[in-house]
Amino acid sequence: MSDGVTSPQPNDDSELAIEGALRPASLDEFVGQQKVRAQLQLLLEAARIQDRAADHILLAGPPGLGKTTLAMIVAHEAGAPLRMSSGPAIQHAGDLAALLSSLQPGEVLFIDEIHRMARSAEEMLYLAMEDYRIDIMVGKGAGATSIPLDLAPFTLVGATTRSGLLPNPLRDRFGFTAHLEYYEPEELERVIGRSADMLDVGLGETERAEIAQRSRGTPRIANRLLRRVRDFALVHHGGGAPAIEDVRAALELYDVDAIGLDRLDRAVLDALVRRFRGGPVGLGTLAVAVGEEADTVESVVEPYLVRIGFMGRTPRGRVATPEAYDHMGAVRAQEALKFDEL
């Protein structure tokens, strides 16, 4: 689907190819996460020297920081095929057995949102990760028998946004766990610069910094905002290098403010500082006030507001900080002045 302009099919295919090319293909091209890159480089090089499958890898961190990209890079650096699946798609042990039994020697299996796999599949995965073997039950009741099935050596790369939901037996079987951190603005500027070059969008240093400042420390958001700026320049100026005014106008059009807050973020803050006088207020009540599900507020909105110091989580509920009042241009309630006492 395009953003308002329908192009012929060849152009659509070309655009999809460019978007796919935005993902770095090697650790050298990957921007940020320096410690994780160094750790992965050592792990993969040791496996190459010993001519074996690399240890299983768990990638943990918020959405949009590059977990899927790193899984692709692991397969590329290891010179192995990549098989991709997701936790929600593996709802029975049989689903996992079919997947594992079809792997080739050295193949990399990527399971996104691995914490959402069915429990029966998780238990089968324990033996597969440790001994490259699974037991398949044949028959039912007293006549049921277990048939062992040997697997080709493989590398499992699991990705999760909620590592705390992984059972300890599964987490402990990963040879390496990488915790991805949010990006600094300078790193995001490099991400945006690389993507702008690949999309043939001429961006100056000031324009890159403006987009980076509004990207919430997340490369996926940075690339998405860059594409919207490109679209704005294309529609209003027929292409060319977007000026800083174009960047600000495009992001304002898409409700992204100077520090990256979007419509829902501001709705939550507005309800908190004006309707509930800074809190404390329960998550469910706050979600109803903005017309969203509690899970959406908790998993999408809260992490960023807490990280930038606009919201606090206390035993009594969510509270707005004085910084939130300042940003929203609201008069501080007495409760906000007592935030540190909660």
Image (cartoon, rainbow, N blue to C red):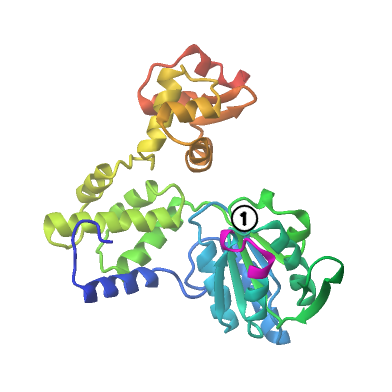
- Residue annotated with mark 1: 116
In the displayed orientation, state which residue is furthest to the left. 237
Say left or right for 161 vs 201. right
- Percent x, y of residue 291: 41, 31
Q: Residue at x 62, y 18 (%)?
A: 341
Q: Nearer the viewer, residue 89 or 74?
A: 89
- Residue 42 in view in this figure: no
In the displayed orientation, state which residue is furthest to the top. 334
Indicate whether residue 285 is drawn in magenta.
Answer: no
Q: Place residue 113 in its image quadrant.
A: bottom right
- Percent x, y of residue 71: 56, 69
Task: Tell me the chief SS of the magenta region.
Answer: helix
Q: Nearer the viewer, residue 32 or 145?
A: 145
Q: Which of 127 and 38 is in front in this view?
A: 127
Q: How crowded is mark 1: few (under 14 residues within 10 Å), some or many (20 or more)?
A: some
Quarter of the image where the N terminus is located = bottom left
- Percent x, y of residue 270: 39, 26
